[in-house]
Amino acid sequence: MINANDLRRGTIFQQDSAPCLVLDVSFQSPTARGGNTLVKTKYRNLMTGQVLNSTFKSGDRLDEADFNRRKGQFLYAADDLGVFMDAESYEQYEIGGELYTDIQGYLLEGGEVSLGVFNDQVVTLEVPQVIELKVTETAPAIKNATATAQTKEAVLETGISVQVPGYLEAGEIIKVDTRECRFVSRA
């Protein structure tokens, strides 16, 4: 059991038979005497993806979710599905839908992922915050580039496009922020 006072961003608890990830939490003390502190939470149901708000009293107890984060690996794409392997148990999962399509542009065969497993079912799938990808297509390097930021579009080896500085050429490896799909630096 988790005490409502112990809720923090990133905590996972069980609500209505589903794991829920706390996105934001705030504590409010009522002015009336004897009033309990209120714990206001914004959380995401990991089974449905729905974002919900709830208020708990400070003494409320919440169920712990049978949720584990495991290291995994992307093996290959098969039609609209991605095949992933749990690095510890070597169990393979075929994952499709939004879980897969949201991160598909950041996956290379053998790439590292984080699997969120609830009751032997993958409910979250995350890639590292920064990954390295090769530039396959871009306009030629801009000559006499000035100090002002001049960018151009580049297509990466997974098929996604990002804005890169004008001096980059095809064949270079760059670091990409997966949260915002943006160029970070050369690798």
Image: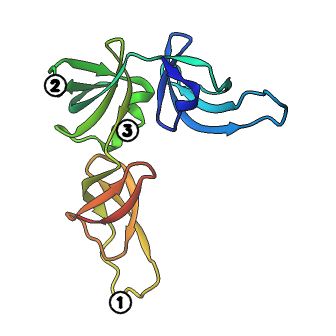
Q: Position of residue 187 (x, y in %)?
A: 22, 64
Residue 132, image quadrant: bottom left
Q: Residue at x 41, y 28 (%)?
A: 99
**Residue 66 as seen in the image, left or right of residue 29:** left
Reading the image, the residue beneath label 2 is: 88
Q: Label 1 sits on what residue type? A: Asn
Q: Give the farthest residue toward the front.
A: 33
Q: Residue at x 30, y 34 (%)?
A: 114
Q: Secondary structure at mark 3?
A: loop
Reading the image, the residue beneath label 3 is: 103
Q: Residues within 10 Å of mark 2 (few under 14, many from 20)?
A: few
Q: Label 2 sits on what residue type? A: Glu
Circles 2 and 1, Cβ within 8 Å, touching? The answer is no
Q: Residue at x 42, y 52 (%)?
A: 181
Reading the image, the residue beneath label 1 is: 144
Residue 138, image quadrant: bottom left
Mark 3 or mark 2, earlier in chain? 2
Q: What label does residue 40 carry, if any?
A: none
**Residue 169 as seen in the image, left or right of residue 29:** left
Q: Give the farthest residue toward the right.
A: 32
Q: Residues within 10 Å of mark 3 (few under 14, many from 20)?
A: some
Mark 2 or mark 1, earlier in chain? 2
Circles 1 and 3, Cβ within 8 Å, touching? The answer is no
Is residue 18 placed above or below 10 in the rendered structure?
A: above
